[in-house]
Image (cartoon, rainbow, N blue to C red):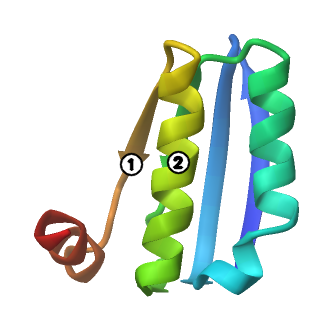
Amino acid sequence: MNFSQEIRSNILFLRIAGDLIGEEADGNLMDRVNEAVSHKVLTCAIDIKDLRYINSSGIGVLITILTKFRNKGGEVYLMKPSESVQKLLVIT
């Protein structure tokens, strides 16, 4: 998994590419999310256009991000999911 992040206009923009499996995402990605939330960033936009695969642990990571933002009154948006990822997210 590769990711990049940027904060603009008080929005955390994340771009996740490759395979999102929980073990890979637990460290750096969650550190960036926690840092943004601690600085009162309330919106997160996650570009998953280049996400090839996501397993149940990866879905757990997305749910954790959603929970962190919503607990502070914020929101998370998933942008540009592939058809296969979108189907999996709808089922979940």
Residue at figure coordinates x 33%, y 64% from the top left? 81
Q: Earlier in the sequence, mark 1 or mark 2?
A: 2
Residue 61: x and y in percent read 56, 63
Q: Residue at x 45, y 35 (%)?
A: 76
- Give the quadrant of the C terminus: bottom left
The residue located at (87%, 62%) in the rendering is: 28
Q: Provide residue 46's location: percent of width, then percent of height.
A: 52, 48
Q: Is residue 83 above or below residue 41?
A: below
Q: Which residue is mark 1?
A: 79
Q: What is the total number of numbered labels drawn onto the structure image?
A: 2
Q: Which residue is mark 2?
A: 46
Q: Is residue 73 left or right of residue 9?
A: left
Which x, y percent locates residue 44?
56, 33
SS assignment at label 2: strand
Q: Is residue 73 above or below residue 88?
A: above
The amino acid at mark 2 is Ile
Of residues 87 and 35, the one drawn nearer to the viewer in this rendering: 35
- Which residue does the image show at 61% across and 74% down from the upper left? 17
Answer few, some or many: residues within 10 Å of disc 1's Cα (few below 14, many 20 plus, some between 14 and 19): few
**Quadrant placement of the N terminus:** bottom right
Q: Identify whether 29 is placed above or below 91.
A: above
Query: Does residue 5 appear in this view?
Result: yes
